[in-house]
Image (cartoon, helix red, strand yellow):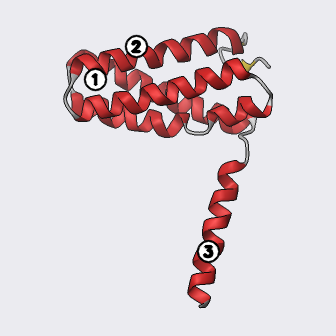
Amino acid sequence: MKRLLAVGLAGLLIGAASLVALDEKELTKKMKAAGEHMNGLRKSMGAGAMPDVAAHAKAMVSALEGTDSFWADRKNDEAVKWSKDGHTAAMALAKAAEAGDAAAARTASSAMGASCKSCHEKYREKLPDGTYRIKQ
């Protein structure tokens, strides 16, 4: 009985944690990880290394997971859509790369890149020191 209660409580805590919106620091950390994997994706796609593409795509899925909550908390429907579209495209890219389907991987990669670019152009500002800040 105690074990069942502990498992149930752990599940509730994990579920509650996933409902908490990201703060700017957490979003920035996720975006830096996404940027690193996007660079890896470009290199791997160019080399036709589908296993590496799949690994980077899976990391992108993880990096983009929950980013929509940051924007939802700020009631920015446009950025929520771009975040969700990017996440969906990353999942499609991972699936295509795992299947060795280079054409589908390119299509998904383009869709993901378009989502990222749209959001970054509107909501990311480059500072004089070369770092970025989020425009809200």
Which residue occupies 72% across, 22% down?
A: 77
Mark 1 → mark 2, Cα distance in angstroms: 14 Å
Mark 2 → mark 3, Cα distance in angstroms: 41 Å
Which residue occupies 35% across, 27% down?
A: 93
Q: Tag 2: residue type?
A: Ser
Quadrant for residue 9, please give it. bottom right
Which residue occupies 63% across, 61% down?
A: 14
**Helix, strand or loop under label 1:** helix
Quadrant for the C terminus, please: top right
Front of the two marks 3 and 1: 3
In the displayed structure, 110 sits above or below 11; it is above
Numbered circle sitting on residue 44: 1
Query: Left or right of 77: which side holds 92?
Result: left
Q: Nearer the viewer, residue 131 or 48?
A: 48
Q: Quickly name the residue at label 3.
A: 8
Q: Is residue 124 visible?
A: no
Numbered circle sitting on residue 110: 2
Assess disc 2: are there few (<14), some (14-19) or many (≥20) residues with their C-alpha within 10 Å of its C-alpha. some
In the displayed structure, 24 sits above or below 89; it is below
Quadrant for the N terminus, please: bottom right
In the displayed structure, 42 sits above or below 51; it is above
Quadrant for residue 126, please give it. top right
Which residue occupies 57% across, 76% down?
A: 7
